[in-house]
Image (spheres, rainbow, N blue to C red):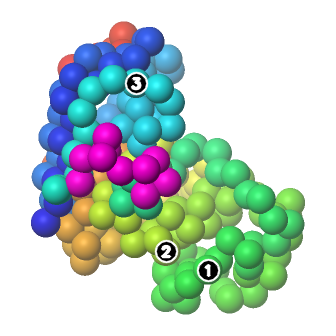
């Protein structure tokens, strides 16, 4: 089962950072705004220029095209982006059980994106990422816009996915209770460094 390893990862405002997340393990991160949490996730996902080594199991980030790497290791940002007017074009092979687990009926596929609340977009963005069956997850405040019930739905869905796929997860959360519920380990970002 693949674990995630980060060595000497750095860019302006970040690092160097070293960390490991085992297969099926969650590392929760927190820190003040501007402390480097999002910079770290974006660097691991190879969305911004950076230096260092990142591996997911036997896969080295620098040996794969960026689009392939991001298929293996899904990054779910705090604000999702949508390129079509309705949900359906984004919903290639979405699992109806996962839709239901997130509190949706199949009718949501025909909804216009502009109709969706920020919380609905957030939940569907996670589903979009999981539908590609990534080997690991980078979650940047995936429940920031959600009420308690939907927060627990997200937590349960990620936990189930993680158990089934033994996916390593890095989960950014400002909620101490959530960090205790979802993570085996917790790290604090400060000044671009992991404490």
Quadrant the C terminus occupies = top left
Q: Is tag 2's residue or tag 1's residue first in the polypeptide sequence?
A: 1
Element marked by disc 1: loop
Element marked by disc 3: loop
Are circles 3 and 1 on residues that touch, CB within 8 Å?
A: no
Q: Is residue 122 above or below residue 165?
A: above
Q: Which residues are magenta?
A: 59-68
Q: Quadrant of residue 91?
A: bottom right
In reply to whether residue 63 is colored magenta, the answer given is: yes
Q: Residue at x 68, y 71 (%)?
A: 90
Q: Quadrant of residue 68?
A: bottom left
Specify whether 65 is left or right of 21.
right
Residue 50, numbered label: 3
Q: Residue at x 36, y 38 (%)?
A: 44
Specify whether 100 is left or right of 183.
right
Where residue 46 appears, as percent x and y from the top left, is 43, 38
Q: Quadrant of residue 19?
A: top left
Are circles 2 and 1 on residues that touch, CB within 8 Å?
A: yes
Q: Is tag 3's residue or tag 1's residue first in the polypeptide sequence?
A: 3
Q: Residue at x 65, y 51 (%)?
A: 80
Residue 92, numbered label: 1
Where residue 71 appears, as percent x and y from the top left, is 44, 61
Quadrant the N terminus occupies = bottom left
Q: Which residue is mark 2?
A: 131
């Amino acid at each position: 089962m693949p674990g995630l390893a980060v060595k000497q990862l750095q860019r302006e405002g970040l690092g160097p950072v070293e960390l490991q997340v085992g297969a099926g393990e969650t590392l929760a991160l927190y820190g003040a705004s501007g402390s480097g949490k999002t910079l770290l996730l974006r660097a691991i996902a190879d969305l911004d220029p950076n230096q260092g080594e990142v591996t997911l199991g036997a896969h080295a980030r620098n040996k794969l095209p960026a689009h392939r790497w991001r298929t293996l290791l899904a990054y779910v940002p705090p604000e999702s982006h949508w390129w079509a007017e309705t949900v359906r074009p984004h919903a290639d092979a979405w699992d109806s059980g996962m839709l239901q687990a997130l509190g949706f009926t199949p009718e949501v596929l025909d909804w216009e994106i502009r109709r969706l609340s920020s919380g609905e977009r957030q939940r569907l963005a996670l589903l979009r990422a999981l539908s590609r069956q990534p080997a690991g997850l980078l979650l940047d405040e995936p429940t920031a816009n959600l009420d308690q019930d939907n927060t627990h739905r997200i937590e349960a869905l990620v936990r189930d996915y993680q158990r089934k796929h033994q996916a390593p997860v890095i989960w950014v959360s400002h909620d101490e209770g959530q960090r205790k519920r979802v993570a085996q380990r917790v790290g604090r970002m400060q000044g671009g460094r992991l404490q």
